[in-house]
Image (cartoon, rainbow, N blue to C red):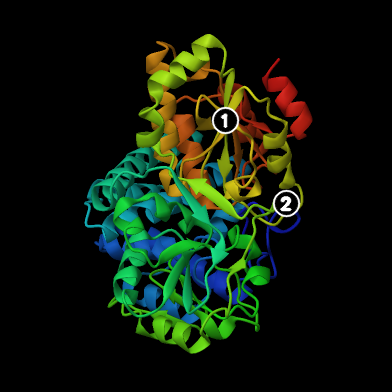
Amino acid sequence: MFCFQCEQTAGGKACTKVGVCGKSDGTAKLQDELTGALITAARKGESVPDALLLEGLFATLTNVNFDDDAIRALIKRVNQPSYDLYKLRDADEDIRSLKSLILFGTRGVAAYAWHCVALGYDVSEICAYIRKALAAIGDDALGQNELLPLVMECGKVNFTVLELLDKANTETYGTPAPTKVTQTIEHGAFIVVSGHDLHDLKLLLEQTEGKGVNVYTHGEMLPAHAYPELAKYPHLKGNFGTAWQNQQTEFANVPAAFLFTTNCLMPPKESYADRVFTTAAVGYPGLVHIGADKDFAPVISKALELGGYFEPRTIAGINGGGSVTTGFGHGAVLSNAGAIVDAVKSGAIKHFFLVGGCDGARPGRNYFTEFVKQTPKDTIILTLACGKYRFNDLDLGEIGGLPRILDMGQCNDAYSAIKVALALAEAFDCGVNELPLTLILSWYEQKAVSILLTLLYLGIKNIRLGPTLPAFVSPNILNFLVENFGVTPTTTAEEDVKAILM
């Protein structure tokens, strides 16, 4: 086993015996074999269907699929010899670094494309890049001059797929609107839905309608409450708990069913494993998996059997808040663009901070909470992805009627933040890097890698990245990112806020 694709990799170098995420050595090898089979298919020009290509890559993301049998079935469907990924490990460290950026970024692209396909949108051009990228990873003759453009192209393609996903979500579910979401769980049977897949949530809401089962979101599903076509269901009640890495504590002995639609699944504890279900690319041995027919009857039956709480119960946020607000996508923010521009010109808003990304359990992630707490009262916090759970229940007041913390949605909604930044740059007739805007990003897994590459492709500079830098980035490649884009590691909240606002 040799895995260094996530931020929490062992010792900041690589997991070599068992994954910090919980995957075994055997599962890691099967995921490598699956990836290698897809690389071989791409090199040979074999026609692996787009759906299988995306599912195969999605299954290898961190905290998605731990089910060896499910991975073996995917390998069998690809039906190709496996390129040996250990060639990557043994390669020149800069080549390994660039190919890792391409591979991990491409896995992120595949995850976003998966959601587009679920809503019936064409991703053939995106899959064409994925095949080209995989073929390049398996080409031992390529050097830095050939690989670096592919890294940047990954960022470009990810921008395209994020834009398409934004279109797919808004055309299907409507434009998100600012919405206050309770974290109080009502009495009675309920299901908690985690992950990112809004399509699965919609199907579950349809199937639970009128059956006496309430539905609550968890983790990255929180922004679902802001979409009109999902919010119209009265039994979509609120949000349960906080970020994904707290599930083993927050789910313990809860009398409800849990459905995982995408990452981030942690190995279930005995105290709640009997009530966890998976679907789509997610898998874990021993859990009931809901197949392509999307018949959620077993989930509903389990929720009714367990019965829920006898009286309301609040699952407070990290800072003690009993409710959170979401729904500040680009539609909502840009509808206030005139007021925002005027507030900047008048000095009411001095700076914007985009503080977002993936959360995790590694010590040091309280940095993001402390950073937000230390931002001055004349600044706005834009946030997205599960990193927001570190601070989204804080009351930081308002500026001109807008909350100082604006939750823009899932990591899938990164396009919203980019669109707002580009629109503000246009309004002020300047480049994005000239705006009073600083990006403070937390990363954990491969979708965060693809978003970072998108920001670099767009030429956005001076990004602060934490809590640690990727283990797969070599000193030379890191130096390239520092010199050309000003990417720097986070230090302390106090020092970084002071340095940014100097």
234 or 287: nearer the viewer: 234
Position of 352 with respect to 123 (left or right) is right
Position of 378 with respect to 416 (left or right) is right
Question: Could you tell me residue 355's position as x and y percent?
Answer: 59, 37
Q: Is residue 58 above or below residue 106?
A: below
**What amino acid type is highlighted by mark number 1?**
Glu
Q: Callout 2: 10 Å neighbours few (<14), some, many (20+)?
A: some
Question: Could you tell me residue 96's position as x and y percent?
Answer: 57, 47
According to the picture, the residue beneath numbered tag 2 turns out to be 12
Label pair 1/2, CB-CB below 8 angstroms: no
The C terminus appears in which quarter of the rendering? top right
Instruction: Report whether residue 104 is seen.
Output: no
Position of 321 with respect to 406 (left or right) is right
**Secondary structure type for disc 2:** helix
21 or 302: nearer the viewer: 302
According to the picture, the residue beneath numbered tag 1 turns out to be 398
481 or 317: nearer the viewer: 317
**What amino acid type is highlighted by mark number 2?**
Gly
Mark before the other along the chain sequence, 1 or 2:
2
Question: Could you tell me residue 190's position as x and y percent?
Answer: 47, 75
Position of 343 with respect to 157 (left or right) is right
Residue at the outermost front position: 311
Dot in front, 1 or 2 = 1
- Residue occupying the point 49% across, 53% down: 181
- Residue occupying the point 39% across, 68% down: 235
Q: Callout 1: 10 Å neighbours few (<14), some, many (20+)?
A: some
